[in-house]
Amino acid sequence: DQQVKQNSPSLSVQEGRISILNCDYTNSMFDYFLWYKKYPAEGPTFLISISSIKDKNEDGRFTVFLNKSAKHLSLHIVPSQPGDSAVYFCAASAYAGNMLTFGGGTRLMVKP
Amino acid sequence: EAGVTQFPSHSVIEKGQTVTLRCDPISGHDNLYWYRRVMGKEIKFLLHFVKESKQDESGMPNNRFLAERTGGTYSTLKVQPAELEDSGVYFCASSQTFISGNTIYFGEGSWLTVV
């Protein structure tokens, strides 16, 4: 049973527009959420994170929103750039430690 | 500062053979993790070391997998004997502290193909 789900396997966006990647989780013990970006043949690269005590965290073009009641988080990228094309993984961890539970990933394609 | 490094980057072995993957964490990181991604599925946790001790090995699939971290520095993950379903990417990661919210940094992965 997948505790973290990314229901959209792929997303295509025009350069300059907003990209919205979504993630749902089921485990109410998760208290920290991270987004990783992954290029082919490379490891996941940390992008941005959010603690459960917040509902929004922003870092440049990247903003993560957390809706605890809905057990849903989203990553907004604006404006999207061709270099953002990659697979984005949502991950969650519980208070007890650092074990990450990953979603299946969403492949983002930003078209010039 | 060097990141998490893994060796080999690619390995092709026959079913029944043994493969040993190595991970060097970021210097000063006590926490070392192994994850793997098989068949394009989600990345799954295997185990977690704090220094040389196994903190959590709940994700290890079976006793064909053996992880060690002698001296609390680098770690090895041995698969013996390898099976076809072991094919995938094995990621190592490290972090400084053992608290939720600490950023975990990943290596580039070791691609294992069992034929």
Image (cartoon, rainbow, N blue to C red):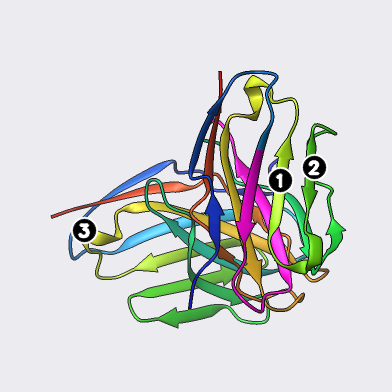
The reply to whether residue A71 is in sight is no
Task: Say which of A14 and B53 sits in front.
Answer: B53
Q: Which mark is residue B12?
A: none
Q: Are marks 2 and 1 in contact (CB under 8 Å)?
A: yes
Q: Is residue B69 left or right of residue B18?
A: right
Task: Say which of B94 and A3 sits in front.
Answer: B94
Q: Which mark is residue B66?
A: 2
Q: Is residue A29 magenta?
A: no
Circles 3 and 2 on the same chain? no
- Nearer the observer: mark 3 or 1; the answer is 1
Give the magenta-colored segment's residue range. B20-39
Can you identify the residue that label 1 sits on?
A: B77
Q: Which mark is residue A82?
A: 3
User: In the structure shown, which secondary structural element does the residue marked by tag 3 occupy?
Assistant: helix
User: In the structure shown, which secondary structural element does the residue marked by tag 1 occupy?
Assistant: strand
Say what amino acid the circle numbered 1 marks. Leu
Sequence-wise, which precedes: disc 2 or disc 1?
2
Residue A18 percent across, percent down from the top left? 28, 64
The reply to whether residue A11 is in sight is yes
| Alpha carbon distance from label 3 to label 1 | 36 Å
